[in-house]
Image (cartoon, rainbow, N blue to C red):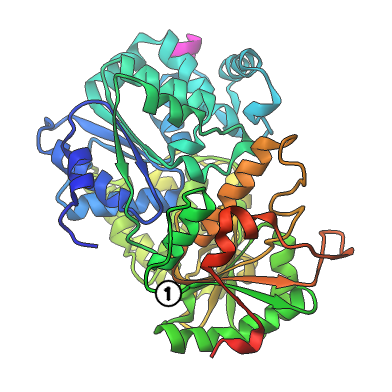
Amino acid sequence: MSKTPTDEQAKAIECQGNTVITARPGSGKTFTISQKIAVESQTLLSYQGIIAISYTRKASDELKTRCERLGTKRNSSFFGTIDSFCLHEIVSPFLSRYNGEKTVLEITDEDTHANKFTRSGVTDLAKKGLVTGAISIGLLCDAALEVIKNVAAARRYLKARYVSVYIDEYQDCGAAQHELVMLLGHMGLRVVAVGDLDQAIYGWAGKSSIYLQKLIQDASFCHFQLTRNYRCHPSIVAYSLRLLGDRAANIVDGDKRVIQIELKGDEAAIAHMIALYVPRLQKKYGITDAREIAVIARSGATLDRTSRALQIPYRMYARSPLDKGFSKWKRLLGKLLEVYYSDSRYFADFMDAYFTSESNLRTRTQCITLVQRFLEQPENELQVNKDLAFQIAELCERGMGTIEDKTAYSDSVKDLDLLHASYKQPRNNEISLMTYHKSKGLEFDAVFCLEAYQWIMPPQWDRDKNYNTYQESLAMHYVGITRARKVCLLPLASGRHNKYETYYDTVPSEFLQLNGVQNLRINAKPAELN
């Protein structure tokens, strides 16, 4: 994609009021947001900044990096997830003012998904957590709302420091996040929201695309659409659009890049087919590195069964204990391990995240020395030298560590297989295995989308009785297909196993016949791809 904004992108970038941008996969939304932030940053005073909320830390880091390349100063800005913003900018600094007394804050992992409680019930839980100082990670948005509404100092701080709030993946927004964003807007901050109504896949967690739809319909927001897909081959674009109901979407040149492959057998047969196809795909489509090939499934159990039979190098993404729960030290220690295993990120990135130019020079210098020692040690000594990581964390976030944080780090570094799956980037010869949810926001040259079976995608036969589930499953299928830049493959085995290892004969998903998409793909046998 050109570095010069398209007409669609330029209109969104130039808008100076509240903005909602609906963006197709691969349409350059991160480019557009970073350009928009860069333009706005030119008018900010030295103490002013913007809030940039991304759904994942990886997406946040990417946006921050792009903004820095454009010369955006971020000393007064916030880049991170919504939970991180609520905790570090609202709840933690103003909790004592809310309670009227100094309170030690503890973040817990208690399951408090909004779809399990009424809104009033969730609010009551958040209030209780603020009083006791024990707040579930799922209630951070609700707790932040309570603090803002009841603490004038919090409102003054947010209005004085921040000018705008940018929120990505707004189709995965929950009720509390939407209310928080609108409250910030009513306080005078400009709101810029970006999302795709067709990629809403977190309904099970109380998220809904209805909030993005509300912004589109809000007269105080200017709505812009980014419709051109720069990521995917035109035939993949046509297939994905036809899947969503655009019957005008057709393949112009006849080069079909969505391929359905029917196999006899189960997950092992699919694994053998993948091993056979990978070198063919690399040769046919000019894919230099195998790490640009991904295998995506809905179920982790399916990935496990597939990986056990996979006879080529692979990397299966996993969550480490540091990803569970929420604390400053867990986030810091996770970032430290990311830098340790990264080929492209330098420890200076880590230092800049925790020390400004005005920071204590002695402390910063001490931390630099320790980080260099940390990066130089062999990975089999990470467990032995865990106190070194804790020293770094203490210098960066003094007094914020807990026994739970230290245990989570120790559990992470003692298991090298888990450590590699969580933090180490795939080697050039390793394909990537991940769930559909994990793949969102990523892209690869070639993608194998597994589990396109009835009762899996969608999980229920009767769409009328399970409309939301059906739509979310369709969105997941759409997300998987649009991760592919050059070619997308849909393997269908004659049988599969559930998580209890029970064998079932398979029925192809109705999505494979939806809106005539079967006419826009190749139906092949394993031996037919040369």
334 is higher (above) or lower (below) than 91: below
187 is higher (above) or lower (below) than 291: above
Residue denoted by label 1: 254
Crowding around mark 1 (Cα neighbors within 10 Å: few <14, some 14 to 19, many 20+) is few
Q: Is 207 situated left or right of 301 in this image?
A: left
Q: Position of residue 26 (x, y in %)?
A: 37, 56
Q: Is 109 situated left or right of 6 in this image?
A: right
Per the rendered image, the range of residues in magenta is 97-101
Tally of numbered tags: 1
Is 337 within the magenta? no
Q: Position of residue 227 (x, y in %)?
A: 33, 49
333 is higher (above) or lower (below) than 507: above
Q: Is 500 situated left or right of 92 in this image?
A: right
Q: Nearer the viewer, residue 265 or 392?
A: 265
Q: Quadrant of residue 196?
A: top left
Which three-letter amino acid code belongs to the residue tagged 1? Gly
Q: Nearer the viewer, residue 67 or 452?
A: 452
Residue 374 visible somewhere in the drawing: no
Q: Nearer the viewer, residue 73 or 525?
A: 525
Residue 473 visible somewhere in the drawing: yes
Looking at the magenta stretch, what is its main secondary structure? Answer: helix
Q: Residue at x 61, y 37 (%)?
A: 203
Which quadrant does the N terminus fall into?
A: bottom left
